[in-house]
Amino acid sequence: MFLKKGIVIGIAAIVLAGIVGLPPVVWAQEMYGQQIDKPTGTEIVFDFIIARPLGFVGLAMGTTFFIASFPLAVITGSAKNTASALVGEPFNFTFVRGLGEY
C-alpha cells in the first residue's frame, strides 16, 4: 500500500517537474536566437494541457475586470486600449494562435 502511494507520488513529481521546467527551455531558445520553425510535440501538449486553459482563465478574468472598469475607461477615453489589453490579447493567445506557437 505504501509502496504504491510512493510510486504514484514519485510519478506525479516527475511529471510536474517536467511541466514546470518546459517553459524556460522554450523561452531560452527564443532568447538566444534559435528559431524553431514548427513546434515540437512537447510544446503542443504543454500548450493544449496547460497554456490554453490558463489563457481561457485569463480571458475570463480580463473580461470581468474590463466590465468592472468600463465606466472609468469610457470617462478617461481609454476604453479601446483597456479592451485590447484585458480582452483582446488573452483572446488572441487562447483562440487565434496555433498550438505550440508562443
Image (tube, rainbow, N blue to C red):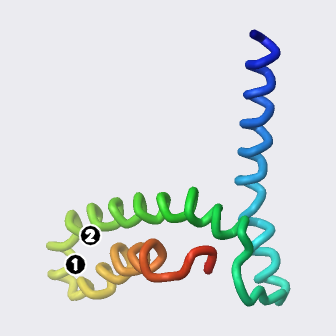
Residue 95: quarter of image: bottom left
Position in image of residue 100 (x %, y %): 63, 74
Lateral position of residue 23 relative to residue 67, left or right: right
Q: Residue furthest top?
A: 1
Residue on which disc 2 sits:
66
Most foreground residue, 2 or 79: 2
- Residue 56 drawn above or below residue 34: above
Q: Residue at x 36, y 73 (%)?
A: 86
Task: Give whichever of 87, 5 is nearer the camera.
Answer: 5
Residue 20, horizontal then vertical, whole percent? 72, 53
Q: Establish if 39 lies above or below 55.
A: below
In the displayed structure, 96 sits above or below 94; it is: below
In the rendered structure, the answer to whether residue 75 lies left or right of residue 6 reads: left
Q: Nearer the viewer, residue 39 or 33?
A: 39
Q: Amino acid at mark 1?
A: Ala
* Location of residue 14 by image quarter: top right
Local packing at callout 1 (Cα closer than 10 Å; few below 14, some 14-19, many 20+) is some
Q: Nearer the viewer, mark 2 or mark 1?
A: 2
Number of dots carrying numbers: 2
Q: Decide: marks 2, 1 in contact (CB < 8 A)?
A: yes
- For residue 79, which quarter of the picture? bottom left
Q: Residues within 10 Å of mark 2 (few under 14, many from 20)?
A: many
* SS state under label 2: helix
Disc with the residue nearer the chain's start (2 vs 1) = 2
Residue 83 x %, y %: 29, 80
In depth, the one of 78 and 10 nearer the eye is 10
Residue 73 is tagged as 1
Residue type, label 2: Phe
Residue at x-position 51% and y-position 82%? 97
Residue at x-position 29% and y-position 67%: 63
